[in-house]
Image: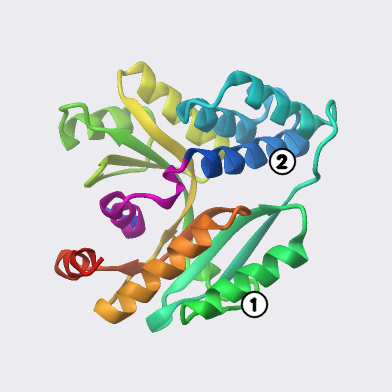
Amino acid sequence: MSGHSKWATIKHKKGAADARRGRLFTKLIKEITIAARMGGGDPNGNPRLRTAVAAAKNANMPSDNIERAVKKGTGELEGVSYEDCTYEGFGPAGVAIMVEAVTDNKNRTTSELRKIWEKFNGNMGVQGCVTHMFTRRGRIQIEPGGKTEDDIMADALDVGAEDVLTEDAGFVVYTKPNPNELNSTKESLEKKGWKIAEARLSMIPQNYVDLQKKEAESMLKLVEALEEHDDVQNVYANFDISDEILRAIEQTG
């Protein structure tokens, strides 16, 4: 199996920082706004917007909030102008990190993220310094619902998915890195009775760095601090932590 997102598993074990409702809504609203600005306000003709709206509904965001975010993106309502930006760099032990952000002030965001990197023994690098260490793919997180990997494998391959993986939180289905492909596969799996926890385009590490306890503690703090920044949408990093070391970190608090 390819493209196992180790950080996704670790976040599931430790509890995702983005679980706080207000911060999650802020991130989703930004994504909806910029998706509507770039591709129009009709989800049927805008795959990125369709994915963003589906994520917002999955998070139980009120429909009025979604509608306002779309209208701000299309210019029907006055709002802040956002832009996509990507940051790359390294963490402890040379771990590669990619950060996707949406901001209304790139200079401010760049400065703040650089300070976070430096605070936790990392370094922000130049554009393109770690891109080659990741592969872009569609990633669909599925709740098992009492079914087996063989069950999801059969259904996923039947609807054109590229790969299936079992993780602690359930199953992960990978698709081609195309919003239309991602949405089509998601909708087809839903029709087959699968409950989708999350569906988005993602950067999958090509290999992983095994971390010892001290490095792992710094790395977890760095990633969590990056994720808690209001402008950050996604953080990808190519590290792994053994269950033994993770338990030791959890016990020490």
Residue 217 visible somewhere in the drawing: yes
- Residue at x 60%, y 75% (from the top left corner): 115
Identified at 57% across, 76% down, the residue is 129
Instruction: Determine which residue is flagged by label 1.
Output: 126
Quickly name the residue at label 2. Answer: 34
Determine if the magenta segment contains residue 130.
Answer: no
Instruction: Count neighbours of disc 2 (C-alpha within 10 A) and say few if under 14, some if 14 to 19, many if 20 or more.
Output: many
Q: Quadrant of the C terminus?
A: bottom left
7 falls in the magenta region? yes
Mark 1 and mark 2: Cα distance apart in space: 24 Å
Q: Is residue 100 left or right of residue 20?
A: right
Q: Earlier in the sequence, mark 1 or mark 2?
A: 2
Residue type at mark 1 is: Val
Please, what is the three-letter code of the amino acid marked with disc 2?
A: Ile
Report x, y in % for residue 100.
59, 56
* Position of residue 178 measured from the top left corner of the image (x, y, whole percent): 55, 41
Residue 183 position, x and y percent, is 50, 30
Q: Helix, strand or loop at disc 1?
A: loop
Q: Is residue 212 visible?
A: no
In this view, the residue in front, 252 or 197, is 252
- Magenta segment, principal secondary structure? helix
Q: Give the left or right position of residue 184, taking residue 37 as reference.
A: left
> Which numbered disc, 1 or 2, marks the residue closer to the eye?
2
Residue lying at the far front in this picture: please name it: 253
Q: Dot 2: what SS?
A: helix
In the picture, measured across the screen, residue 92 lies left or right of residue 74, that is left
Segment tinted magenta in the rendering: 6-20
With respect to residue 172, does 62 lie above or below? above
Q: Nearer the viewer, residue 85 or 22?
A: 22
Q: Position of residue 61 (x, y in %)?
A: 54, 27
Badge 1: residue crowd in 10 Å (few <14, some 14–19, many ≥20): few
